[in-house]
Amino acid sequence: MPTGSGAGNGRLPALETIGKLPEVPDPPPAEGCQGGGESCWPARSVGGVDRTLTRFQGSMLVLVAGATFSFGPLTFRALLEADAWQYLFYRSFSAAVVATLTIMILGRNPIRSIVQAGPRQAVAGLALGSCFVLFILSLSRATAAFVLLLQCTSPFVAAILARVFLRERVGRDTATAMLVSSIGVVIMVGGGLDGGDRLGILFSLLLPVCLGGYTVLIRSSPARDPGVPTVIAGFMVAIVAGLVSLGGPGLDLPIRDVAMGFIGGGLLIGLGTPVFNYAHRFVPPAETSLLLISEIVLAPLWLWAWPGEVPAASTLVGGGVALFAVVWLTVRTALREGSTRGRWSHGLHAGAVVAEPDHLDR
């Protein structure tokens, strides 16, 4: 009897075709990629479910994540008694708890998600945890200006690592924005480059390396649960910071300090980092790190609003230059994307697969 399309000859379809997803032609390679490897192709939809973002949408979400992270210094400034390690404990522990709860609310098993995440996301979690620790320790041993200036080099580190490991070249627009934003950050901190002690300088130098490596690891790993690196980083840092604190002043703090740790970790990192992890799979690593400069630019403004730390004129001028570069790049991306939009989304995704068919029911 007839069996629909392809069965006009009255024969049943071959058994090996039953239950298989229809074949979908490959989309065109993403702009800025060379070599034709898996890292150069946008993510596909699986079973008719679109799981991609455009490059512009990913850029906007990274900007939102950066703006969210910029409120972190407010929580650190509001501490009454906590030292760096005590703050790190409550901040990291709350971030891990919120990320775990988010995975559970979405109907997935956190342990299973961690196991299925793969080694690259596990290493990314360790790199993210290192960023947590290095940033706070750098601020405690070096001037904020020196730390921020070196953090501004993370787009260049990410560009080099992406070129070596992902064979992704840096576009002309991104390179221009990187140079302009670097000039802006130099203007911001030019009056306060006193450095710090040797450990502070070392921590500050390692920070952009870890951040650049983290962006490349996340982008090159298969898309699984974006909250997994936060869970790994949070619990790892909480264990280390807890042991250090228990060996010293302990973990008994005023309610206000504990609350600041939970706001800085659970609210800002626990919710912001998974959004960042998902969104920046569709944006090249160098551009991702550049968009995160919005965190450096906006943080002094929040400290100006409260508790009233008046920024220098150079901070406002340099921040305006850096922010202009980020906004310009975002607008250029939107215009370029609008002129080339076709059948396929032009968002980038460096993972081998977005999700396997068996993930659709989770």
Image (cartoon, grey):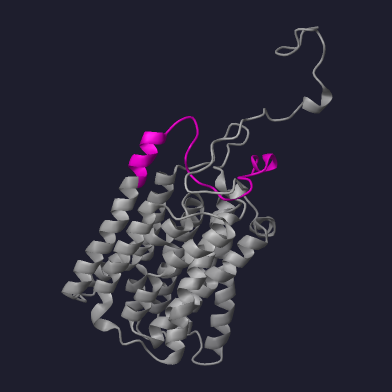
Does residue 11 lie above or below 68 as drawn? above
Inspect the magenta stretch and tell me whether residue 320 lies in it: no
Does residue 196 lie above or below 316 as drawn? below
Q: Position of residue 348 (x, y in %)?
A: 50, 46
Q: Residue at x 56, y 47 (%)?
A: 40
Q: If the image is split into quadrants, where does the N terminus sit?
A: top right
Left or right of 314, for residue 31 = right
Q: If the image is split into quadrants, where does the C terminus sit?
A: top right
Query: Which quarter of the figure has residue 104?
Result: bottom right
Q: Position of residue 17 (x, y in %)?
A: 77, 26
Viewer-proximal residue among 124 and 237:
124
Q: Residue at x 32, y 46 (%)?
A: 332
The span shown in magenta is 333-362
Viewer-proximal residue among 293 and 132:
293
Q: Main secondary structure of the magenta part?
A: loop
Left or right of 78, for residue 153 = right
Can residue 97 be spotted in the picture?
no
Inspect the magenta stretch and tell me whether residue 345 lies in it: yes
Does residue 127 lie above or below 100 as drawn? below
Can residue 294 be spotted in the picture?
yes
Residue closest to the far left: 313
Q: Position of residue 221 (x, y in %)?
A: 61, 55
Q: Residue at x 67, y 29 (%)?
A: 23
Q: Position of residue 279 (x, y in %)?
A: 47, 51
